[in-house]
Amino acid sequence: MKSLFKKRAFALFEIFVGLIPILGGTLAIFKFLENREYPQLVIMSMMIVTIIAITAFFAIRNWRNYYLKLVACADAFHNFNHLVRDEFYKLRHLKKQNALNKSILLSNLDLTSQESVNILSKLLTELTGHKIHVHLKIFGQNEKSNEITSEHILTTLCISKGAPGERMNAINGKSKHKVGDNTHLSLLFIDKQPHFAASNLRKKALNYFRGDNQINFKCSSENWRDRYRSVVVVPIRIEKLDGNTPVFENLGVLFCDSEVNKAFRNFEMEHMINIVKNFADGLYTYLDRISYLLAEIEDKNQTQTS
């Protein structure tokens, strides 16, 4: 509600600012007409036309930017939902034909995950105007629980295309990150916070508090101060109820970062977080299904060998 009020107040302010030169110019024209000072009238008219043209230019540019961002969001969500839907259908069809195996599942996982982070990276890049890299990190197949500890490991499954070469080399080696070695991961999976975000990570890391206690920010990635200037980190999980106790089923995390300070601007941060959470929710459904099918195939293989 407060955000809506700010937007409307700002729109009214823009209208007010635009009306002042138009009204002032109109009154000046009438005065010049009364005095018949035509040379000055021409100059003043040109000034008014110029002001109106500039105002129109900025209004059209702003409208165009809003339109392009709307198109980017619509295309991204459309492409992502179609991707997940189509891959679900392929897997279901293969299962009905008894043609589904572990190799096909893992190949599908790699391709679908890679395309998903590419779509999200492109969307965030278009919305912020800065290159945004997206990492998808997952827990092991049997670690879907509320009891994630500091010893649990996240493995980087993929990173969006266009990332620097050294990052891609790390992904090829399936880089691993211990929860306890990363402040942002500890906050998500041990403190169970809904997300971690920083417009200026260096500044936030220097003044980070857990409750009333200042803590040292930790990150297991080398050169994180240069790589991760602005970040949004969202867990891939679902909240369930065990009796009256909320229990999280954690599958992984989406890590979005930029090498540009304030690429994720503070006044837009809430919306950027929600966009990433939307992708995290879709990926939870997909990853959960892959995990179920992998377990089913492994059980079937064990039954056949015993």
Image (cartoon, grey):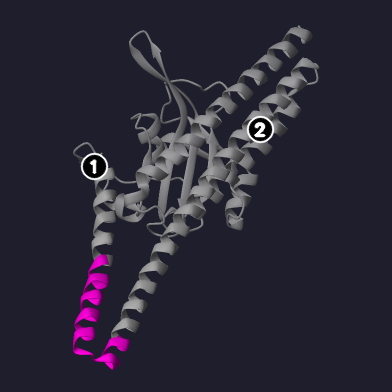
Dominant secondary-structure state across the stretch colored magenta? helix
* Residue 268 versus residue 39 in the image, above or below: above
| Number of numbered discs | 2
Q: Position of residue 89 (x, y in %)?
A: 70, 25
Is 24 covered by the magenta stretch?
A: yes
Q: Are marks 2 and 1 in contact (CB under 8 Å)?
A: no
Q: Is residue 24 visible?
A: yes
Magenta range is 19-43
Between 216 and 266, the one lying in front of the other is 266
* Residue 28 versus residue 276 in the image, above or below: below
How crowded is the residue under tag 2: few (<14 C-alpha within 10 Å), some, or many (20+)? some
Query: Which is nearer the N-term, disc 2 or disc 1?
Result: 1
Q: Quadrant of the rendered structure where residue 299 is? A: top right
Residue at 32% x, 51% y is 266
Q: Quadrant of the C terminus?
A: top right
Is 298 covered by the magenta stretch?
A: no
Q: Report the residue marked by disc 1.
A: 2
Q: Is residue 221 visible?
A: no
Q: Report the residue marked by disc 2.
A: 109
Q: Position of residue 62 (x, y in %)?
A: 41, 60
Residue at 67% x, 14% y is 296
Q: Quadrant of the N terminus?
A: top left
Q: What's under tag 2, amino acid-wise? A: Leu
Between 15 and 9, the one lying in front of the other is 15
